[in-house]
């Protein structure tokens, strides 16, 4: 990827920056910088209004084709917007699962009817989605899902349990990876279903995290139903669709994620200057190493973005999480160490602690676990990307 921007791209950047700044300095100042790691429950209604404001001005679905209501932005323009969003302190997106995961999946794998039914609600910011992948015995080993879907006339009947379901308490819809052929091999017999949340047979139970919030949930299905046509792709071909969704998760927004990390590092560095730790050789080294790692991650993401544009996981794209998850976890540890006693006070819930950086530390404990643990991710890369022998069972 060419790392230089054309005049047209710089004009796009200026337009995005002005739009974001006008609103986040003005009517949406309350949500600026809110809703990040460990802060997901805060100001949800206000952030939902922000999502709808993005939708009204066509800032959702930037890269989606214009025929489906998207802006048809180039990959570089998408990167630019996510960077400016992070620089402006844009709040955590309540529609991130719909726009970042389900929407691109529907665009690439869905039927025309599904595109017309489901994409407009995401683009307007009015429909919130959640993800039904992980189960108690199928987290990183996603192919081990046991939630069942059986056909009953014109409907699928779903029974089972999902866990770590982000946003489930607010979502109207969930996409669920279900086993529709129990006799098929492990990666076969799985289907990708779209299921309404507001119905009998779905029970959402919040999971209290170490931060004290409950962004994650357990979701139980006991006879929940969805129309037979709500299968994305072919029946029993859900594994291929699910892998496409994971590729979209590591798309253009990763550059914005890294700028959010850069904002965190800048705050930590400024704090180190104020309390004198910037003169300590050990802290100077840790701060410098964090800055260097961010640059490495940025160039890797830019190099691999064209490979991810069509929802394809490659050897190069597979390693992205192994870069950012340990980095972000170490950044949380650095924040607490720079905070010193204020950091300990924050963890203990004592007044005077730095709430935001403390939440960052607590939340990032899970970074190397969720979305596929680093240990399993290395096995996947070794076996599926590099063709190495399977790990002994």
Image (spheres, grey):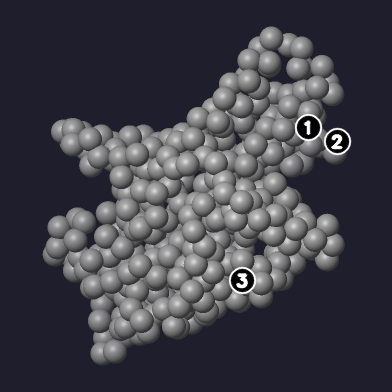
Please state if 98 lies on the left or on the right of 51 as rendered.
left
Viewer-nearest residue: 49 or 300: 300
Whether residue 276 can be seen here = yes
Of mark 2 and mark 3, the one earlier in the sequence is 3
Distance in Å between CA atoms under marks 3 and 1: 43 Å
Please state if 61 lies on the left or on the right of 246 as rendered.
right
Of mark 2 and mark 1, the one earlier in the sequence is 1
Residue at the (82%, 17%) spot, across then down: 276
**Residue 123 position within the rendered picture, expressed as x and y whole percent measured from the top left:** 56, 73
Q: Mark 3 points at which residue?
A: 58
Distance in Å between CA atoms under marks 2 and 3: 41 Å
- Determine the secondary structure under disc 2: loop
Q: Name the residue under label 1.
A: 345
- Answer whether labels 2 and 3 touch (C-beta < 8 Å): no
Residue at the (72%, 37%) spot, across then down: 357
Q: Quadrant of residue 161?
A: bottom left
- Determine the secondary structure under disc 1: helix
Q: Mark 2 points at which residue?
A: 352
Q: In which quarter of the image is residue 375?
A: top left
Instruction: Check the image and report above or below for 89 versus 287.
Output: below
Instruction: Check the image and report above or below for 19 versus 328.
Output: below
Q: Which residue lies furthest to the front in this view?
A: 7
Q: Residue furthest bottom?
A: 153
Please state if 374 lies on the left or on the right of 331 as rendered.
left
Quarter containing the N terminus: top left
Instruction: Check the image and report above or below for 124 versus 130.
Output: below
Residue at the (49%, 59%) spot, across then down: 74
Residue depth check, mark 3 versus mark 1: number of the one nearer the observer: 3
Distance in Å between CA atoms under marks 2 and 1: 7 Å
- Answer whether labels 2 and 1 touch (C-beta < 8 Å): yes
């Amino acid at each position: 990827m060419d790392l230089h921007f054309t005049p047209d791209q710089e004009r796009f950047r200026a337009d995005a920056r002005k739009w974001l700044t006008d609103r986040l300095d003005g009517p949406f100042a309350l949500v600026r910088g809110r809703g990040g790691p460990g802060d997901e429950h805060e100001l949800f209604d206000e952030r939902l209004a922000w999502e709808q404001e993005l939708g009204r001005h066509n800032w959702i679905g930037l890269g989606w084709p214009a025929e489906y209501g998207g802006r048809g932005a180039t990959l570089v323009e998408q990167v630019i917007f996510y960077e400016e969003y992070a620089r402006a302190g844009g709040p955590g997106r309540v529609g991130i699962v719909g726009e970042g995961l389900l929407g691109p999946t529907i665009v690439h794998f869905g039927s025309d009817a599904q595109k017309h039914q489901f994409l407009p609600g995401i683009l307007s910011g009015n429909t919130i989605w959640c993800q039904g992948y992980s189960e108690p015995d199928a987290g990183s080993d996603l192919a081990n899902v046991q939630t069942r879907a059986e056909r009953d006339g014109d409907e699928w009947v779903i029974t089972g349990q999902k866990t770590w379901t982000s946003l489930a308490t607010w979502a109207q819809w969930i996409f669920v990876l279900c086993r529709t052929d129990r006799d098929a091999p492990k990666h076969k017999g799985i289907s990708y279903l779209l299921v309404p949340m507001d119905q009998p047979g779905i029970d959402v139970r919040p999971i209290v995290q170490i931060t004290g919030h409950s962004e994650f949930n357990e979701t139980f299905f006991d006879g929940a139903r969805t129309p037979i046509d709500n299968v994305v792709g072919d029946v029993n071909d859900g594994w291929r669709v699910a892998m496409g969704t994971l590729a979209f998760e590591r798309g253009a927004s990763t550059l914005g994620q890294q700028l959010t990390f850069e904002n965190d590092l800048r705050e930590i560095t400024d704090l180190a200057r104020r309390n004198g730790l910037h003169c300590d050789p050990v802290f100077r080294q840790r701060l410098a190493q964090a800055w260097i790692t961010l640059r490495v991650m940025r160039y890797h993401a830019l190099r691999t973005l064209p490979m991810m544009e069509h929802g394809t996981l490659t050897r190069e794209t597979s390693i992205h999480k192994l870069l950012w998850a340990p980095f972000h976890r170490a950044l949380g540890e650095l924040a607490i160490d720079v905070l010193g006693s204020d950091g300990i006070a924050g963890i203990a819930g004592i007044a005077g602690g730095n709430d935001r950086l403390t939440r960052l530390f607590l939340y990032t404990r899970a970074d190397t676990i969720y979305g596929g643990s680093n240990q399993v991710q290395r096995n996947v890369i070794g076996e599926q990307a590099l063709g190495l022998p399977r790990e002994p069972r």
